[in-house]
Image (spheres, rainbow, N blue to C red):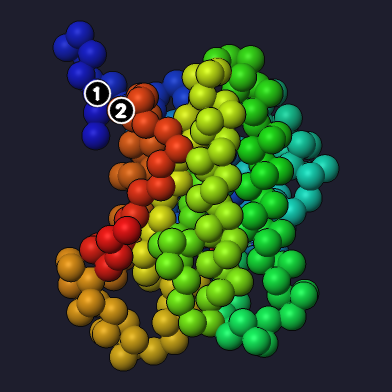
Amino acid sequence: MAAQDNGVRTMILEGKTALVTGASRGIGAAIAVGLAKQGADVAITDLASEADALAKVQAEIEAAGRTCYNHDLDVTSKVRIEQIFAAVTEAAGGIDILVNNAGILVAKPLEEVDEKLWDAHFDVNGKGILLCTNAILPQMRARKAGRIINIASIAGRQGSPTQGHYAATKATAITLTRVYAQEVGMDGITVNAICPGIILTEMGKTNLGSQEAIDHWSTVASLKRLGDPVDVVGPTVFFASDLSDFVTGQALNVCGGIYFH
Ligand SMILES: NC(=O)c1ccc[n+]([C@@H]2O[C@H](COP(=O)([O-])OP(=O)(O)OC[C@H]3O[C@@H](n4cnc5c(N)ncnc54)[C@H](O)[C@@H]3O)[C@@H](O)[C@H]2O)c1
């Protein structure tokens, strides 16, 4: 996708810097590389344990001709978030796009969910969005521009068995999206969410558990297949770019027609 500008074709995100959390694999890695292919320089972050995988994503971004900043970052650590966001801001001159992608899912029936598992999900999937967004907003407000994209889930709209605690965090992500949009819109910042359906990442495959489940849900989907991480890239580029200037507080299902509300 390229924008036409006075006869000169430009990449749609050229001149922008994005930061993606949980970017070492799956949806986060696809988004980080996808944003780079649209011209953005990208800061990729993930847990310190994922350094090897993160380095491979860095190589892909650099192969696309973009600058890549690579930092270990646990989104539950406010101190670390502030440290890394400051380092990227200093190196890149600012962060234009934040993608809150990091997430966890350990499936269990609600009756077996203990406080530790509940808190772990809310720490990463809920508090992580709050901490990262609050850390980025001062610079976005100062520049009167910014794009924040939260990776929620269709689970946040309709929970399913063994995902009650996870679904509750994703409903939280959608609500945070709507409220932030209303609180920061006056400063030219948009906040939108993407609700993937079933995407065949490590999380998606573990959750489905079997080829039979993959086959079943492929049949249920209108497009007769489940998602690939790259399926989430286009909608993210849309929310990250000026194509979506007048869109904020929205949650877009990206699910191949598996869910309609
Ligand atoms: N795969 C699906 O079917 C699906 C569907 C709907 C929504 N989602 C959401 O999309 C996002 C990406 O999921 P995925 O399928 O690529 O999963 P994944 O498990 O493949 O990747 C998740 C990434 O988040 C990172 N992460 C976990 N805890 C972290 C923390 N505390 N700090 C920083 N990073 C952390 C992991 O290291 C990993 O790189 C998640 O928010 C997930 O809930 C996935």
- Identify the residue at image location x=33%, y=44%: 235
SS type, badge 1 = strand
| Residue type (three-letter) at the residue carrying disc 2 | Leu
- Identify the residue at image location x=41%, y=41%: 250
Question: In x, y percent, where is residue 119?
Answer: 74, 67
Q: Are marks 1 and 2 in contact (CB under 8 Å)?
A: no
- Of residue 227 and residue 162, the one placed in the foreground of this image is 162
- Of residue 152 and residue 249, the one placed in the foreground of this image is 249
Quadrant where the N terminus sits is: top left
| Residue type (three-letter) at the residue carrying disc 1 | Ala
* Among the 4 quarters of the image, the one containing residue 209: bottom left
Question: Marks 1 and 2, Cα distance to the nearest angstrom?
Answer: 10 Å
Asked if residue 117 lies left or right of residue 188, the reply is: right
Q: Residues within 10 Å of mark 2 (few under 14, many from 20)?
A: few
Question: In x, y percent, where is residue 125?
Answer: 62, 58
The residue carrying mark 1 is 3
Does residue 83 appear anywhere in the picture? Answer: yes
Question: In x, y percent, where is residue 80?
Answer: 78, 44
Which quarter is ligand 1 in? bottom right
The residue carrying mark 2 is 243
Does residue 54 appear anywhere in the picture? Answer: no
Image: 48 above or below 222 = above
* Among the 4 quarters of the image, the one containing residue 68: top right
Front disc: 1 or 2 = 2
Asked if residue 195 lies left or right of residue 138, the reply is: left
- In this view, the residue farthest toward the top is 6
Chain-order first, disc 1 or disc 2: 1
- Of residue 104 and residue 71, the one placed in the foreground of this image is 104
SS type, badge 2 = helix
Image: 39 above or below 208 = above
Image: 235 above or below 240 = below
